[in-house]
Image (cartoon, grey):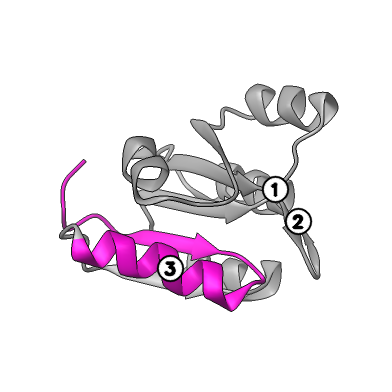
Amino acid sequence: MKKQAKILVVDDEEDICYLTKSILRKNGYTNVRIANSVEKASELINQHEFEILFIDLSLGDGTGIDIVQYVENTYMNHPLMNIITGFCSIDDRNKLESLGIDSIITKPLTREKILNAI
């Protein structure tokens, strides 16, 4: 993936957002935005066409699935979409796979997990 790719990190835990952003920036990805809610992510998705998304499955005002479906209905091109989760049920995994999620990253996050998803 090209280093100038537009990346969106969505997690209601600010520490996760900043950790992910820091790992990406230290590895040359400088165009990283963060959002802490479905609402803020939707605003950013309307303003920018992201090529890579890291989306938490459980958010305070909805789910990562809400964002994935919103992206699918908004973008013409399919971005690389990664779900971040502490736990993913079989039903959630099946739903995510049917939506075309590229990877499911389990917490705790590591540099390797984030970079391997790209």
Do tag 2 and tag 1 residues touch (Cβ < 8 Å)? yes
> In this figure, which residue is indicated by the disc labeled 2?
58
Mark 2 against mark 3, which lies toward the viewer? 3
The image shows residue 65 at horizontal and vertical percentages of 71, 45
The image shows residue 94 at horizontal and vertical percentages of 74, 22
Callout count: 3
Amino acid identity at mark 3: Leu
Tell me the distance, in whole angstroms, between the alpha carbons under discs 1 and 3: 15 Å
Residue interval drawn in magenta: 1-26
Above or below 116: residue 61: below
> In this figure, which residue is indicated by the disc labeled 1?
86
> In this figure, which residue is indicated by the disc labeled 3?
19
Quarter of the image where the C terminus is located: top left
Dot 2 or dot 3: first in sequence order is 3
Mark 2 against mark 1, which lies toward the viewer? 1
Dot 2 or dot 1: first in sequence order is 2
Horizontal side of residue 77 vs 90, given as left or right? left
Amino acid identity at mark 1: Gly
- The residue sitting at 68% across, 31% down in the picture is 96
Q: Is residue 17 magenta?
A: yes
